[in-house]
Amino acid sequence: MFRTLFDIALRHILGRKRQTLTTMAAVAVSTMVLITTISLTRGLVDSFTETIINAAPHINIKGEKTDPIPTDLLSGAPSSSTSFVVDHIGRDDRDEVRNYGRVLEIVVSPAYSKKVIAASPFVESQVMAVKGNRNQPVLLKGVIIDREDQISRIGKSLVSGDLTQFKKSPEALLVGRSLAKDLDVRLNDQITIISPDAKSRQCKVAGIFFTGVNAADNTMIGSLKLGQIIEGMPANKVTGISLRLSDPINGAPLARDLTRMTGYKCNTWQEENASILMLFARIGYIVISLVAFVGVVSGFGVANILVTTVFEKSRDIAIMKSFGFSSGQMVGLFIFEGFLVGLGGALFGSLLAVGAIYILAHLPIESSQGPLTRTGFSMSWNPWYFCIVTVVTVAISTIAAALPSARAARLEPVKVLRDSNL
């Protein structure tokens, strides 16, 4: 019996080739769009996570104390207490890690040596970079370059210059590629750095780097001593300390432990990029909505061809029922037709998606995808996306066949044959 129903289903599908191919093409295109969109969205998330893990600190020890001086001095004081404000306009105390050598001893101690791969102190300063008639506010990061190279792999990110030249001069700079383009800076050019206290210094470009992270590629890197001089810090103070971990995904417990041990606030890379990760999550919800809506639209296409088939094949259905085919078998017949149309369209759409993903991933065009800059698009080749979308598409097509199949089951052979004058 199944063989007979299968042959009938094929005859119904092949009997209206143009409409069948149109419906399958619609299912294929929707499948391709869904798989490609999911691949692009997930690929961007994976690329961002991989880039951040490879090029950015996994934990930042900030110069922000966890037990700051209270601003409400009268809280809990006797009601007779009086407060006076004198010289209330002044500069806030900057965040800094004092005696950072002691903090480094803690993070490299035996208790943390297996968790912390590298530690790099740094000083951040907002300066004005001037080159000819161009100027731009820039974040300057002063580092110990050998330690920083262990954190961000900056040596591998250089597109020109080298770290040897950088180490030779305390006034040398490594400039991000985006910033270099904005200032029209090339290797060995001179840049004037104007510090917050309006003092200027002449620095030489010893290298230009490109990490792919837009925020990092708009900064400059100098020596730790240069950063301390610009910020007016003594040799034992820094803005913070960057850490690279053996397990960057699960760094939150270690960050809490270091916060308790050092007394300074420690942020993981997930906390530093919380807004971007939240944006990716929202994009994911939008993609899920697209999957639902486009899948429903393709289901309507399948239902349409089957409704037409039931209408045109009413006499055939009546004859089949008069020969002993049950209503359940009629339902199964048209549901099976919906399954075949959905399966054929989904498989063809998966093949189209493979081509679309390959083309997008290998486009020789550099594009800025949110916080990243890449050549081509960051695409994910996870086979589960193909399987899930194919299963969902086939399921929707099969479910969409329920309405016309129910109509076919309700047809009365005597009435149909009498009305058709057979």
Image: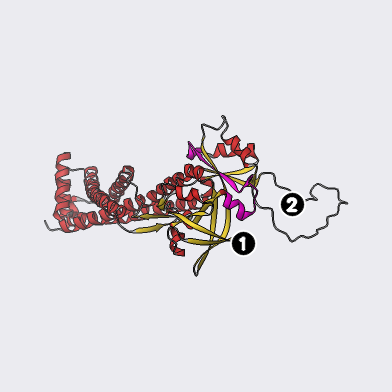
Seen in the image, is 123 located left or right of residue 390?
right
In this orientation, which residue lies closer to the viewer: 173 or 40? 173
Q: Name the secondary structure under disc 2.
A: loop
Q: Residue at x 58, y 58 (%)?
A: 126
The furthest residue to the top = 110
Tag 1: residue type? Lys
Residue range in magenta is 225-250
Please give the residue where the numbered disc 1 appears in the rendered image. 199
In this orientation, which residue lies closer to the viewer: 359 or 351? 359
Mark earlier in primary sequence (2, 1) = 2
In the rendered image, the vertical position of residue 90 relative to residue 238, given as above or below? below
- On the image, the x and y values in percent for residue 317 come to 17, 50
The answer, for residue 167, to whether it is visible in the render is yes
Verify CB contact (< 8 Å) between mark 2 and mark 1.
no
Please give the residue where the numbered disc 2 appears in the rendered image. 71
Seen in the image, is 162 located left or right of residue 2?
right
- On the image, the x and y values in percent for residue 338 come to 24, 49
In the rendered image, the vertical position of residue 335 relative to residue 193, given as above or below? above
Q: Residues within 10 Å of mark 1 (few under 14, many from 20)?
A: few
